[in-house]
Amino acid sequence: MKRILIAVGIVVIALTSCKPTEKNYRAAYDAAVSKREKTNESLAADGLISEEGPRIQVIAGDSLYFLNERLSVEDGAEPLKSLNVAVAMFKMNTNARSGASALADKGYDASVARASGDKCYVIAGSFDTLEETRGFIKRFRKENKSYAYIGLDGHPVVIRN
């Protein structure tokens, strides 16, 4: 009987000691707000927190989408620079080649870059500086208002290589 009373006493103490208080709620809320503020700068293009999606950054009033990904080009293609403007993403290399060929016919220095997994990007331009990249994106969007941006949520994406 003594053991039962001790066990009941331990259960009662455990249940009453876990009682949430306003102070605990406030601390948890403040921690969540702080975490949200820290992740706002790394929101994906679609507003969801993601490690894989492009991140939006406002640079000199322009909203640009950035993605860090290791890219490789096919043999014989020009090597990519550090900032690459991707305007489409495909799983099949032949579709990406077709997209790059269509842009090359319009006068762009387009190429196909393969990323990890089965992603093939159509790179419309490759640049060394952010200023060149911003200017190219403005020009590309102006000249190609109805471009589909397949797989990239309606925007060209700057891939840091």
Image (cartoon, rainbow, N blue to C red):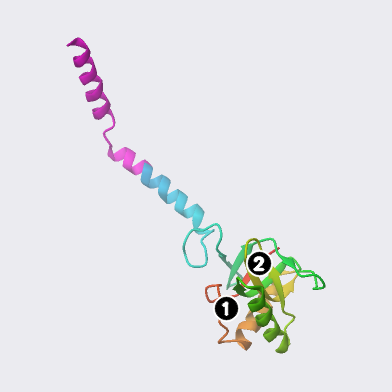
SS state under label 1: loop
Q: Is residue 15 left or right of residue 143?
A: left
Q: Tell which tag, 1 or 2, sits nearer the viewer.
A: 1
Q: Nearer the viewer, residue 62 or 100?
A: 100
At horizontal 60% and vertical 73% (from top left) the residue drawn is 90
Q: Return the disc, 1 or 2, that comes first in the chain's sequence.
A: 1
On screen, residue 11 versus residue 26, left or right, reads left
Is 20 magenta? The answer is: yes
x then y, percent, for residue 39: 50, 55
Residue for badge 2: 159
The residue under the point 70% across, 64% down is 71
Range of magenta residues: 1-27
In this picture, residue 57 sits left or right of residue 48: right
Q: Is residue 19 rendered magenta in the image?
A: yes
User: Chief secondary structure of the magenta span?
Assistant: helix
Residue 30 x/y as whole percent: 39, 46
